[in-house]
Image (cartoon, grey):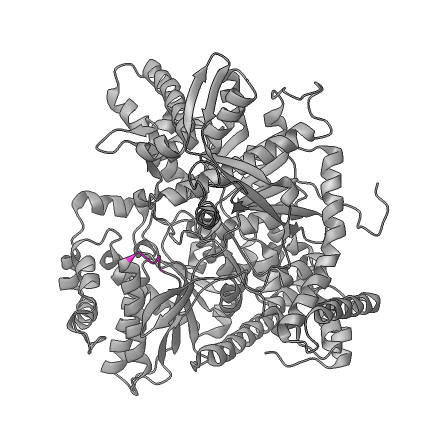
């Protein structure tokens, strides 16, 4: 995409990507050729671009292996407290470039590949995204792994190796169509299967209460096969492990009593067991109580806890008794972080192992469990909270149901003693919800079974304490904490925006890469004309590059000097892509009514996936594409306004669009977005934010100064007041002529002439049951967008605000977030010491 550098320029180029020593380059070339040779000897004699990608991936992987082995050896010898981050999602994206960046190999690889007549960027584009997540929660887990390795923590990510990740999104005739994401089709060079650590996981069966203790018997067994992926820290020679489990049927599966003589049928039935790790559930912020999903949740928990306990028992400085049955020290050696309630079964499963298997006294086991586990809450939306039917547990996990009942009884006895006669409080605080269908409230289970509960931005943690878990906060206020989310500056600045990283490093050095608070030093350059010019130039280059990409991939031509106005995130009513859409229609109507009036040209880009079963989200996509069809083909509009739907938004597309954005839209209804992390990525990459006082936007405004963001709309208090009064959308529709015109156009089929009633569900929702009050913020939003236009017409002032935002984004590094988790929840200290590299002797 960028013009290739001349031979001399490449050698002179010294940037944050690492200096390419000639020895390194020769070494990379040699290794690359060796890998390529063995690939081709096996199969063919003509190399394809994919062969080149795999040869490079294996070359880079070779640099990881020695460090990986040494890191794990280091942990075994020193026996630090280990951190286990349990998540059903790890949205990793691509691995090649991230590994080169963190090992300081990028320039050496770039030069070596160039000398071989190849283009590094073209090879990087061949890699599939590892899309094992839906959105924010899964991407947060990936950023956290990067930070934990960079901070030298003995940390492990544990999850599921889904055969099919988040679906690929195609837009056909304006509608979303899902396609299976067969990401492993060509193999995955970054993972290593570890069959020697395969473990059994039990389902169904029944519980036998014997004099010797409780036995869970007659179960069905599924095997969990671990696949390990290395997680390198930034230039510290630490390489941690992400271990993902894949389901495998045991070889005697269904060959016992069921299929007497039907051997073929029995072997085909192995699929039933192996379906557990087949596919990621594609819901973001929505609970769908499917049995297969509960199986996935127990599968990852049961395999992981066996692994944790095996590692605890075999560690060098474990307990002194020969069979290591002493679990007193377990919480001193193990921290388990639950990423939302999805791994909540860790709590009853750890109890089951301690009590039934290890014969630990019940009360002691409960203390150990609580001291070990901590829970992160990610949402306050009621439809997202996991509430599993008791009947499903009874069948699938009968022993866990007994344990949950016993834990709940202990909990309620305590509440009853503290609040005698307060029956309603007992009902509100119970883990079991009574009703037509008795349900287990997994969030309540997490709160009673953890020593720490945190929200993910200050405003969210306050809502958690004052409303969602109010009763629990009154009971144990010391449990509740805030840990504002962050993003890794390695992927989200260095890797995706090397031009910006370079001009920053020129001014303040490279320390910011591992201490993002150093960006504050850029405040000294806010009036430096050279720096202002450089920042604007990097942004323009990124915009040109992204415009070229859009033209090449999607055949859409955009005006690179227009304002790139971007909203990329999952499609959800609470995120209010509809508000953005109404603004686009309003701008269009203004241009149509006065075509000769000069205006700030805009390219509005909206991207994101809708859950396949979420009708309204799919209608929102259809509306955006339909509005785009009308606007983009109206000769009166020309280059002044374009509306583009970015198909198949994913990590690798985020890495391209975010550095090119001028304006970042973070416009959820106040009190609904727990934190957001895209907001932080845009901020550090030099976009200005238009947003509500919601999630981490509040802290971004606090860091940069509210006057340096475009803040509009209701605050949480205003939303609550409007709820008390009663929200009446028609009031706004009657009062605001531009809003009425836009809604009437959607309603009449102006944007869907071939199907005039196409959007009746959308209009009906907006007018009569909009939980997220789009119309209530419309007027303030349109006015605020006017202020955006005003500032954009003064490029120098705009860029000065951009610099201030970048300078104030340091708080939003996941290194800061993880340091807080480490010190305040896990009881460990980050370490800056470098493990010696494999070519040097060990300490």
Based on the displayed image, in which of its 4 quarters is residue 503 positioned?
bottom right
Residue occupying the point 35% across, 30% down? 394
User: Is 613 contained in the magenta span?
Assistant: yes
Please provide the residue range marked out in magenta. 610-614
> Toward the viewer: 719 or 89?
89
**Residue 255 vertical position relative to residue 576 in the rendered view, above or below:** above
Task: Report how many numbered discs are placed on residues in the image.
Answer: 0
Residue 746, x across and y down, in percent: 20, 70
Residue occupying the point 25% across, 20% down? 423
Q: Image check: 578 left or right of 216?
A: left
Q: Image check: 233 left or right of 127?
A: right
Residue occupying the point 47% across, 81% down? 551
Outermost residue to the front: 261
Residue occupying the point 74% across, 75% down? 10
Residue 56 in view, yes or no: yes
Residue 761, x across and y down, in percent: 19, 62
**Residue 314 vertical position relative to residue 531 in the rendered view, above or below:** above
**Residue 462 vertical position relative to residue 211 in the rendered view, above or below:** below
> Toward the viewer: 67 or 507?
67
The secondary structure making up most of the magenta span is loop
């Amino acid at each position: 995409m960028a013009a290739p550098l001349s031979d001399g320029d490449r050698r002179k180029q010294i940037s944050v990507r690492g200096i390419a020593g000639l020895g390194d380059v020769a070494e990379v070339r040699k290794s690359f050729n060796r890998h390529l040779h063995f690939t081709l000897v096996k199969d063919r004699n003509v190399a394809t671009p994919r062969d080149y990608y795999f040869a490079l991936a294996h070359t880079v992987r070779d640099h990881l292996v020695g460090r990986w082995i040494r890191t794990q050896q280091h942990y075994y010898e020193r026996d630090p407290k280990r951190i286990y981050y349990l998540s059903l999602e790890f949205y990793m994206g691509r691995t090649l470039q991230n590994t080169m960046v963190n090992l300081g190999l990028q320039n050496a690889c770039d030069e070596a590949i160039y000398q071989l007549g190849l283009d590094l960027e073209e090879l990087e584009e061949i890699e599939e995204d590892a899309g094992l997540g839906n959105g924010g929660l899964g991407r947060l887990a990936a950023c956290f792994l990067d930070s934990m390795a960079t901070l030298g923590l003995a940390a492990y990510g544990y999850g599921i190796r889904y055969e099919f990740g988040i679906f690929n999104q195609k837009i056909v005739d304006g509608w979303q169509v899902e396609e299976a994401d067969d990401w492993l089709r060509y193999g995955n060079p970054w993972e290593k299967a570890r069959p020697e650590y395969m473990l059994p996981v039990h389902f169904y069966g029944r519980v036998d209460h014997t004099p010797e203790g409780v036995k869970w018997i007659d179960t069905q067994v599924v095997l969990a096969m671990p696949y390990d992926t290395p997680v390198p820290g930034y230039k510290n020679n630490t390489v941690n492990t992400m271990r993902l489990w894949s389901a495998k049927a045991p070889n005697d599966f269904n060959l016992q009593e069921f299929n007497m003589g039907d051997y073929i049928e029995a072997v085909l039935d192995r699929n039933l067991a192996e379906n557990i790790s087949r596919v990621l559930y594609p819901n973001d912020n929505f609970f769908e109580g499917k049995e297969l999903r509960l199986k996935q949740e127990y599968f990852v928990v049961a395999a992981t806890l066996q692994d944790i306990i095996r590692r605890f028992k075999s560690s060098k400085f474990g307990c002194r008794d020969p069979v290591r049955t002493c679990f007193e020290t377990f919480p001193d050696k193990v921290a388990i972080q639950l990423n939302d309630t999805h791994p909540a079964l860790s709590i009853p499963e750890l109890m089951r192992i301690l009590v039934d298997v290890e014969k630990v006294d019940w009360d002691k086991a409960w203390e150990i469990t609580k001291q070990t586990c901590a829970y992160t809450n990610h949402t306050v939306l009621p439809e997202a909270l996991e509430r599993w039917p008791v009947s499903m547990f009874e069948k699938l996990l009968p022993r866990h149901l007994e344990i949950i009942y016993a834990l709940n009884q202990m909990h309620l006895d305590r509440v009853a003693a503290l609040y005698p006669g307060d029956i309603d409080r007992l009902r509100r605080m119970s883990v079991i919800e009574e009703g037509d269908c008795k349900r287990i409230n997994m969030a309540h289970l997490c709160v009673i079974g953890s020593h720490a509960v945190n929200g993910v931005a200050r405003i969210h943690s306050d809502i958690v304490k004052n409303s969602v878990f109010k009763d629990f906060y009154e009971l144990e206020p010391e449990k509740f904490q805030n840990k504002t989310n962050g993003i890794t500056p390695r992927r989200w600045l260095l890797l995706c925006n090397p031009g910006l990283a370079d001009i920053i490093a020129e001014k303040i050095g490279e320390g910011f890469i591992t201490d993002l608070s150093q960006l504050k030093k850029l405040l000294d350059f806010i009036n430096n004309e050279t720096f202002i010019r450089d920042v604007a130039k990097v942004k323009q280059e990124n915009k040109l590059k992204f415009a070229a990409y859009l033209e090449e991939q999607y055949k859409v031509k955009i005006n690179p000097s227009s304002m790139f106005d971007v909203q990329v995130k999952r499609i959800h009513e609470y995120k209010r892509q509809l508000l953005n859409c109404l603004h686009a229609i309003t701008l269009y109507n203004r241009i149509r009514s006065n075509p000769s009036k000069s205006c700030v040209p805009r390219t509005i880009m909206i991207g994101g996936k809708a859950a396949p079963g979420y009708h309204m989200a799919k209608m929102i996509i259809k509306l955006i594409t339909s509005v785009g069809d009308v606007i983009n083909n109206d000769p009166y509009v020309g280059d002044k306004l374009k509306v583009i739907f970015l198909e198949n938004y994913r990590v690798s597309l985020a890495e391209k669009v975010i550095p090119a954005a001028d304006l970042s839209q973070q416009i959820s209804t106040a009190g609904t977005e727990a934190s957001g992390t895209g907001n932080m990525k845009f901020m550090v990459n030099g976009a200005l934010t238009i947003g509500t006082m919601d999630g981490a936007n509040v802290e971004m405004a606090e860091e940069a100064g509210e006057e340096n963001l475009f803040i509009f709309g209701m605050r949480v208090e205003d939303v609550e007041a409007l709820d008390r009064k009663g929200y009446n959308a028609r009031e706004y529709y009657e009062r605001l002529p531009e809003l009425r015109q836009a809604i009437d156009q959607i309603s009449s089929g102006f944007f869907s002439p071939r199907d005039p009633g196409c959007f009746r569900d959308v209009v009906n929702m907006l007018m009569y049951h909009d939980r997220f009050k789009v119309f209530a913020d419309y007027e303030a939003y349109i006015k605020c967008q006017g202020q955006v236009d005003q500032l954009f017409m003064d490029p120098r002032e705009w860029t000065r605000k951009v610099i201030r935002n970048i300078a104030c984004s340091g708080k939003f590094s996941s290194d800061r977030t993880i340091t807080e988790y480490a010190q305040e929840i896990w009881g460990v200290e980050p370490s800056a010491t470098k493990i010696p590299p494999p070519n040097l002797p060990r300490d």
